[in-house]
Image: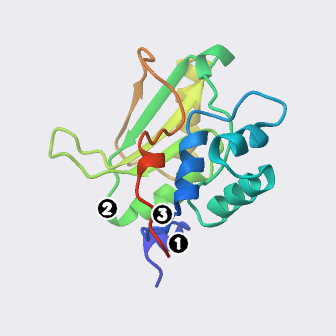
Amino acid sequence: MNSPQQRFGRTDVRVALSAADLALIGAIQGGLPLVSRPFAQLATQTGETEQAVIERLQSLQDRGVIKRMGAVVRHRELGYRANGMVVWDVPDEQVDELGRCLSRFEFITLCYRRPRQGVDWPYNLFCMIHGRDREEVRGKVRQLVQCCQLEAIPHAILFSGRRFKQRGAHYRNAARREAVSS
């Protein structure tokens, strides 16, 4: 039987990264350059050719180091003013099954398990939903409850009150980390 990580296509195995891999990760963590040929500019920064940068990014993606490349969308500017973190108190033996059910919905942007924090914080499954207003988020939660049969599962919606920061992953020391040979 596969582990939960294998079933979800994840692995805890560390991937060997070269100094060139780390330099490229360091160069893109702030975003792609907003120029007509961003990979050519990255090539200049990293001392590689444009084609080598493209191939290295593909290799990093193929090895699972980079899951995807995309824009960091600022939800409020698009009219999504209600961001709800839904927390669920799921029996431990049902977390994997319910996590898979929740993750099928496109409107869920994050879904993960965390350990319970005693009787004051019994929740162990989390998912993030964005909506134009709170009622839209509540409607999506009702849809989840119905489709995933969560009627008996205690949950709460924690709406964001204020955005302090929003950006993609940033690994400050990626370019300075020592390369690991394979």
Q: Is 11 drawn above or below residue 102 in the view shown?
A: below
User: Dots 2 and 3: beta carbons under 8 Å?
Assistant: no
Q: Secondary structure at mark 3?
A: helix
Name the secondary structure under disc 2: helix
The percent position of residue 91, horizontal first and vertical second, equals 32, 58
Question: Which residue is identified by label 1?
Answer: 7
The residue most toward the front is 47
Which label sits in the foreground, 2 or 1? 1
Q: Is residue 138 above or below residue 49?
A: above
Residue sitting at 59 percent across and 54 percent down?
66
Residue annotated with mark 3: 97
Q: From the image, tell me which residue sits under label 2.
A: 92
- Type of residue at label 2? Asp
Q: Position of residue 114 (x, y in %)?
A: 32, 50
Q: Quadrant of residue 101?
A: bottom right
- Sequence-wise, the earlier of marks 2 and 1 is 1
Is 61 placed left or right of 153 in the picture? right
- Provide the secondary structure element on which disc 1 rests: helix
